[in-house]
Image (spheres, grey):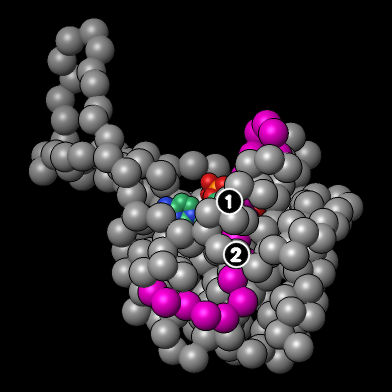
Amino acid sequence: MRILLTAGPTREAIDPVRFLSNRSSGKMGFAIAEAAKERGHEVILISGPVNLDPPEGVETITLESAREMFEAVRDRIGDDVDAAIFCAAVADYRPKEVAEQKIKKSGESMTLELEKTDDILGSARSVFGFEGILVGFAAETNDLEANARGKLERKSCDLLVANDVSRTDIGFDRNQNEVRLFYADGREESLPMQEKSELGREIMSRVEGMSM
Ligand code: PMT
C-alpha cells in the first residue's frame, strides 16, 4: 500500500522568535512509519519539527505550521494513497497576527488573539475527496470514549486511535503508549501498554486488515 502519515507537533508563530506548540515528540507517528516501511509499504511521512532521524527509506517532508501541514497533505493525498494516518498533534488555533519583529516586554499582561487552523483530518474526505482508509488519532484527557467516537464520526474515519494524554507513563514524548481503537462499524479494541514500535506494527496490521 501507499501510506500517508502525519506526525509530530506544529509550531504557530507569534513573532520571529516565539511560537505556540505542544508536547508531541513525533515518536508515535515515526514508529508507525517505520512499521509500515518494514512491512513493505511505501510511506510519505509529513512531520512537524521533531528531534528524530527520518526513518530509512521513507519519503519525509518536514515543516512547521498547521497551514504548511494542511498544504503538504492536500498536495500529496491524491497521489494514489491507499491509507492516510493522522497522528500529528496539530495546533487547533494560531495567533491571528504574526508580529514582524520581536514583541517587546510592556505592561503587566498581554493578550494574544487566536484564530482556528484548518482541520486537516476533517478535510480529508470533505475537502480533499480522499476515499481510502482514513485513520485518525484522539488525544484525550477526559471522556475518552465519547470524544473519540465523536471524532470518528465527525471526521468520517474508518478507525480512530485514542490515547489518554493525562497519563505521564504513556502518550506525549514517552517510548510507550496504550490505546483504544474505535472502528466505524462499531467495533472496539484495546491495545495494552507497550513500546510505540510494537504498537506501530499492531496499528499497521489493523490498517492492512481493512484494505482486504
Ligand atoms: O508524538 P508523541 O510524543 O509520540 O505523542 C503521540 C501523540 C500523543 C501525539 C499521539 O499518540 C496522538 O494522540 N496524536 C493526535 C494528537 C492530536 O492532536 O489529537 P486531537 O484529538 O487534538 O486531534 C484529533 C485528530 O485530528 C488527530 O488525528 C489530529 O492529527 C487531527 N487534527 C487535529 C487538528 C487539526 N487542525 N488538524 C488535524 O488533522
* Number of marks: 2
Residue at 16 percent of width and 36 percent of height: 102
Measuring from the top left, give residue 208's x and y in whole percent. Answer: 75, 82
71 lies left or right of 155? left
Quadrant holding the N terminus = bottom right
- Between residue 13 and residue 101, name the one nearer to us: 13
Q: Which mark, residue 18?
A: none
- Between residue 52 and residue 201, name the one nearer to us: 201
Residue that label 2 marks: 157
Determine the residue located farthest toward the right in the rendered image: 192
Task: Tell me which corner region of the image, top left, top right, bottom left or bottom right, holds residue 41.
Answer: bottom right
- Region in magenta: 128-144
Task: Tell me which corner region of the image, top left, top right, bottom left or bottom right, holds residue 186.
Answer: bottom right
Q: Which mark, residue 151?
A: 1
Judged from the image, the secondary structure of the residue bearing numbered disc 1 is: helix
Alpha-carbon neighbours of circle 2 within 10 Å: few (<14), some, or many (≥20)?
A: many
Residue at 71 percent of width and 91 percent of height: 40
Q: Would you place residue 63 above or below residue 205 in this image?
A: above
Q: Would you place residue 131 above or below residue 26 in this image?
A: below
Measuring from the top left, give residue 199's x and y in whole percent. Answer: 79, 63
- Between residue 69 and residue 104, name the one nearer to us: 69
Determine the residue located farthest toward the left in the rendered image: 100
Identify residue type, mark 1: Lys
Measuring from the top left, give residue 105's x and y in whole percent. Answer: 18, 20
Magenta region includes residue 136? yes
Residues marked 1 and 2 touching at CB (< 8 Å): yes
Alpha-carbon neighbours of circle 1 within 10 Å: few (<14), some, or many (≥20)?
A: some
Residue at 27 percent of width and 35 percent of height: 114
